[in-house]
């Protein structure tokens, strides 16, 4: 079973794979308490150990464990200017943050980027390094040329 070793900032600092029989409780299930009891003396008492069985997804180093969401996640992403994407919302089906609106097909497009200040998607044509940027128009559902090679 995958177990996230969590520091005092709720950050996953290590992922462990533990045999189920090592961390199973008396009632036959894996609980946070049974996992903690087995892991703490072996891997460090100053950490919290979260088994995959109580979370909605698997831990990875660098992720945060959010007890309210009962999920490991990477936090809000940063946009093309390095700003936190505060408009993004938590998706309870995929257990990660999603933009407030999606963009259309990425076929023929190069890296698609989000700008938080105006809530827009940007990209360039595949193979272009200095061509114009395109932006996703949510009304017409098309990529439109911005007329500029800079953002």
Image (tube, grey):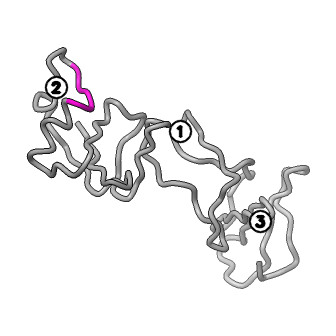
Judged from this view, the residue extending furthest toward the bottom is 130
Element at badge 3? loop
Query: Which residue in the protein does label 2 denote?
Result: 24
Say the numbered circle drawn on residue 117: 3
Q: Give the vertical position of 85 relative to 111 (above or below).
A: above
Q: Residue at left 73%, top 48%?
A: 100
Magenta region, residue range:
29-33
Among the two numbered marks 3 and 2 on one chain, the one whose residue lies closer to the N terminus: 2
Among the two numbered marks 1 and 3 on one chain, the one whose residue lies closer to the N terminus: 1
Image quarter where the N terminus lies is top left
Element at badge 2? loop
Query: Which residue in the protein does label 1 denote?
Result: 94
Element at badge 1? loop
> Contact (CB < 8 A) between labels 1 and 3?
no
Image quarter of residue 83 = bottom right
Q: Position of residue 63 (x, y in %)?
A: 40, 54
Q: Give the vertical position of 25 relative to 147 (above or below).
A: above
Q: Tell which of 36 and 4 is nearer to you.
A: 36
Mark pair 1, 2: CA separation: 27 Å
Q: Tell which of 145 and 86 is nearer to you.
A: 86
Q: Position of residue 127 (x, y in %)?
A: 65, 76
């Amino acid at each position: 079973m995958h177990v996230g070793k969590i520091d005092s900032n709720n950050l996953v600092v290590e992922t462990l794979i533990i045999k189920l029989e090592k961390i199973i409780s008396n009632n036959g299930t894996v609980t946070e308490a049974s996992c903690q009891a087995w892991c703490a003396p072996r891997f460090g008492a100053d950490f919290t150990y979260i088994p995959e069985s109580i979370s909605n997804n698997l831990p990875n180093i660098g992720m945060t464990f959010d007890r309210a969401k009962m999920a490991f996640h990477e936090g809000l992403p940063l946009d093309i200017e390095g700003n936190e994407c505060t408009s993004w919302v938590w998706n309870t089906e995929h257990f990660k943050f999603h933009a407030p609106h999606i963009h259309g097909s990425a076929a023929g497009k190069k890296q698609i980027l989000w700008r938080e200040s105006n809530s827009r998607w940007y990209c360039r044509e595949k193979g272009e390094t200095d061509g114009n940027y395109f932006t996703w128009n949510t009304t017409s559902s098309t990529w439109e040329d911005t007329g500029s090679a800079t953002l």
